Amino acid sequence: MTRVAGRGGSPSAPRSADVAQLVGVSRKTVSRVLNNEPYVSDDVRRRVLEAAEELGYRLNNAARALASGRNRSIGVVALGTAGYGTASLLVAIEKAVRDSGYGLRVVNTLGGEPDDIARAVDSLLEQGVDGIIVSEPVIEGEVSVRVDVPVLFLGAPPAFGGPRVVTAGVGADLLARAATDHLLDLGHQTVHHLAGPLRWYAARDRVEGWRAALAARGRHQPPLVEGDWSADSGYRAGRALAADPEVTAVFVSGDDMAVGLIHALREAGRRVPEDVSVVGFDGNPVFAHVTPPLTTVRQPFDAAAGDGLRLLVHAIEKPDSEIPPANDLPVELVVRASTAPPPSARG
Amino acid sequence: MTRVAGRGGSPSAPRSADVAQLVGVSRKTVSRVLNNEPYVSDDVRRRVLEAAEELGYRLNNAARALASGRNRSIGVVALGTAGYGTASLLVAIEKAVRDSGYGLRVVNTLGGEPDDIARAVDSLLEQGVDGIIVSEPVIEGEVSVRVDVPVLFLGAPPAFGGPRVVTAGVGADLLARAATDHLLDLGHQTVHHLAGPLRWYAARDRVEGWRAALAARGRHQPPLVEGDWSADSGYRAGRALAADPEVTAVFVSGDDMAVGLIHALREAGRRVPEDVSVVGFDGNPVFAHVTPPLTTVRQPFDAAAGDGLRLLVHAIEKPDSEIPPANDLPVELVVRASTAPPPSARG
DNA sequence: CTGAAAGCGCTAACAC
DNA sequence: GTGTTAGCGCTTTCAG
């Protein structure tokens, strides 16, 4: 049955005093029960819970925050794009935050520039958060803000310092390295790279991994090509790369760009994977169904968010104890049909 | 006992009293300035703003909410999937909320079932929100919650009633109709439909549009095929549909499913669009680069979120006045290469 | 135009 | 185990 209240501006909601009165205890006792504090008899605890239920009592978080100084919520500064990667990360963050017993406030910054971040952080602080997550920002300069809560930089080094700033990676460099190694293992002499915009730390991190893989085998490092994460930019990059017969393998810093790139390659008459192998980045499952199915690396969004949040919550709740070590993140290469040995190896 | 502003040694954040003292006015005057209330001289206003800036003063939202009863934030119950559609809608909602001067709290419900929604709404209410957006939920039963703030159902009819419940569509039926009409206009005798899970209202809404388009021309309505939004489910549906030579046109309730479906069709030897035309739903730009580029309808996320939020904010801020009418949403068909006239029309 | 007093609903610290 | 007493920092009356 539908139960509606919709009482617009009528009798005020029940307060803890109402619950206390109904049970015949003090407000503090009600408070103890609601906060799961010890030193309440099981009997009283049960009766308080029952009374609260009966009255439809709901804790007033504003009052609680004001009195305790803790808001029980965490704010995230996100990128405001609907791409699979950023969206997955946000979903993972929401889950991790909720599992930690906090609420989540979201502010998007379309650009991810230092000023945008400063503004977003400010607005979060004003709304009242106990900690802030800055998710995969663009970092070119210093962000100048006064922050008095712990801040987690997820997938980027801190853009501002402070005693309560923690960092957690998404393991992008290792992932990029695995992707590049896969291509090298297949027999390619070298691997080209289509990067995301280099102003994004996420893009640079992957470049590092690609470079490291090449360097480890003493391979030639082809010039970097830069896209903007969009499939269109991948397509444009693909047209340029298709003209170069030296190109037999490309590691692309995002699935969408990879799909655009493959489009251009095939349009130019270069077969994938027979002539050119392509590896994407992210792990969007839809690309198992394009032609050819895309080999990619899966980003460990859940693990990264969970690990980062563990550090952040630690910094919030035990500000004086040492920050625990970060966990290792899984590296998962999803091999499909867009990669193969180079033409030379097949005679 | 009166507390003297302790801005010497005390690391506590500055309060409005500190600002007031610095300027030499009362706290109420500071409050007026910060809330953009009238009846403050320009001079005082300016000095207050300067002092606030100088002290690095930041309003305490918990205190404000407690005193005023308004939290200045809106909560959204989202689906917790990283698909292009839901993610885009969330981004659009965030923007609309921010533009309205509210903060955004997010709770995901993995399932979108009535019970999940009830839980999510409860948690939002406890966190303190002035309004709630329920975004594209699964609706099979009634949601039983006590809500005392306005609720906007976005892309679904209300799951619970009440005087302060508003609804805004995303225009899915019209979009579905446009997609179906496009196929019919091309000369197809009828159009098959691969729907999303019918427990989702969003899926049912699109089915309606498809049915309406067929009915308007007196065309035969083929049996409905049901997927689960994933490309994999589209692929499975495609294998079944490929076996039926009658199928020349399919309207698919999501781009990902459409891509999976095309994969299966081609694998079975049916060419797209020569033998079978396919239209997707959502408008993810990456699918301009798959083979064949996907014809689709673009969901007007920004317009839908903006319009819905306008209604919600109205319900919050002017609870007694009538709810303004909803705006018409744009219908945008993106014709690419996955649709063509049926084989029969081409001889 | 501006200010003084009185809480908002809860938790903190300490009593009992 | 439980109650009492003070506020948290702001906005709301209602005076001036």
Image (cartoon, coloured by chain):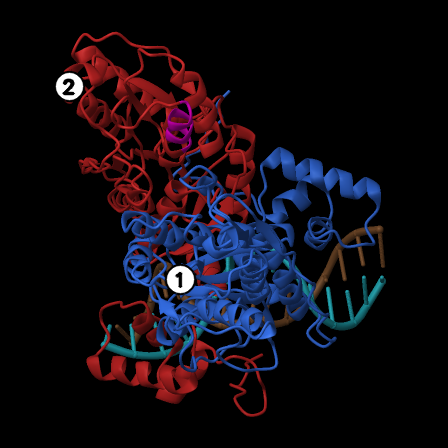
Chain colours: A blue, B red, C cyan, D brown
Q: Label 2 sits on what residue type?
A: Arg
- Residue placed most toward the observer, A237 or B304: A237
Range covered by the magenta-colored residues? B260-268
Q: Disc 1 on helix, strand or loop?
A: loop
Dominant secondary structure of the residues highlighted in magenta in the image: helix
Look at the numbered disc 2 and give the secondary structure of its residue: helix
In this view, A211 is above or below A14: below
The subunit carrying tag 1 is A
Label placed on residue A165:
none
What label does residue A247 carry, if any?
Answer: 1
- Vertically, is C10 above or below B219? below
Q: Which mark is residue B346?
A: 2
| Residue B68 lies in quadrant | bottom left
Left or right side of B15 for A60 = right
Give the camera-side residue of B181 and A292. Answer: A292
- Position in image of residue A91 (x %, y %): 51, 49
Q: Is residue A97 visible?
A: yes
How far apart in space, not on screen, are marks 1 and 2 (Cα)?
41 Å
